[in-house]
Amino acid sequence: MQAKPKALTYLDIFTAVLMLISVGMVFFYAPMEAVMGNVQRVFYYHVAVGWVGMLSFFAAAIAGILYLKSKDRKWDMFALAAVEIGIVFIFLNIVTGSIWARPIWNTWWTWDPRLTTATIMELIYFAYLMLRQGIEDPDRRARFGAVYVILGFVSVPLTFFSARLFRTIHPVVIGTNQPGAEGQFDMTPKMVHTFLFSLFTFTFVFIDLMWHRLRLGRFADQVEQLKLRLSL
Amino acid sequence: MIFLSLLQEGPAQTTAYMIAGYGVIFIVMAIYIFSLWLRWKNLHRDQEMLKSLLPAKTKETESGKERNS
């Protein structure tokens, strides 16, 4: 396996610095929300991790299309890496949403359209990993996986627009809010700065993790090749 | 609940939920990064072992060929 590229080390450091600044902004720069109190600060990372999750699934769908066009296994590896990261971050999105909901909606969970579609989306991509486990032939696994991530991507815009299309209590950050939404707040300029910086930071977290996960995938492939050589 | 909070003079006391939220985020991210590192380490160990077996296997194949010829 090749040594860790210098660019990746720089990216690690840059991402870590961004994270530190972002944490500082969340806790010390952004003001406390007047009604909800400190729990509103969860919002900055709740949205940011959701953004990373959806970005990952989008990247996986693009990789799926590219695999079907080129039959190059690297795109299958890319899709798997993106889905794995997406699952972790959508899980965080759901859990932090639940923690925020407890004091604001007075419940940990409700079958609201946004919460339901997000959970279905998470389960769809979890099933992708199970599907892969069930197919031994690598080419067949890659082909089925590619089709699955393309079709599964339907759940992403459905989740994103669910708070806008259906009657929901989930607040909408960008766009018109539902009349029944609870937990809505007006962002001050400092809140907007913190929110946008968190999105920026987590975009780099995504790129950094993807790079690491892709290297791991390539390494696993090399070890698999070695095993094949030994078994022949 | 938000309606009760509206009746309060100051913001609602929700610091514990904020700590829980950020705690979950940092712990899960740390676990994921650790899992990447652990998988890398295991693959490295496997690679070393397979590489050490490979010369023996090559010799075995070559001696088999010589015997056949």
Image: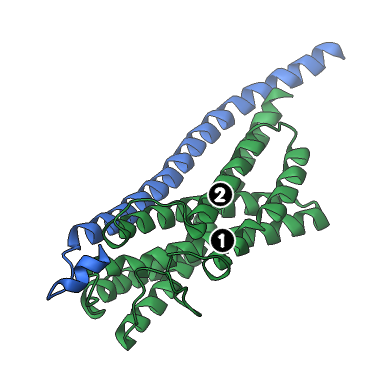
- Residue A187 location, x and y as percent? 34, 82
Name which residue lies at 32% across and 60% down: A105
- Quarter of the image for residue B16 reads bottom left
The local secondary structure at tag 1 comes to helix
Image point 76% across, 52% down: which residue?
A72
Q: Judge whether residue A184 can be spotted in this image.
A: yes
Pinpoint the chain carrying mark 2.
A
Residue at the disc numbered 1: A159
Q: Which chain is green?
A: A
Q: Which quadrant of the view contains residue A97?
A: bottom left
Q: Which residue is mark 2?
A: A120
Q: Amino acid at mark 1?
A: Thr
Out of A78 and A36, give the one closest to the viewer.
A36
- Residue placed furthest toward the left: B9
Q: As rendered, which of B63 and A90 lies closer to the eye?
A: A90
Q: Position of residue A98 (x, y in %)?
A: 36, 54
Chain ID for blue: B
On screen, residue A163 versus residue A62, left or right, reads: left
Q: Give the image location of residue B68, x and y in percent.
A: 85, 12
Relative to A102, is A203 above or below? Answer: below
State the quadrant of the C terminus of chain A. top right
- Identified by mark 2, the residue type is Ile
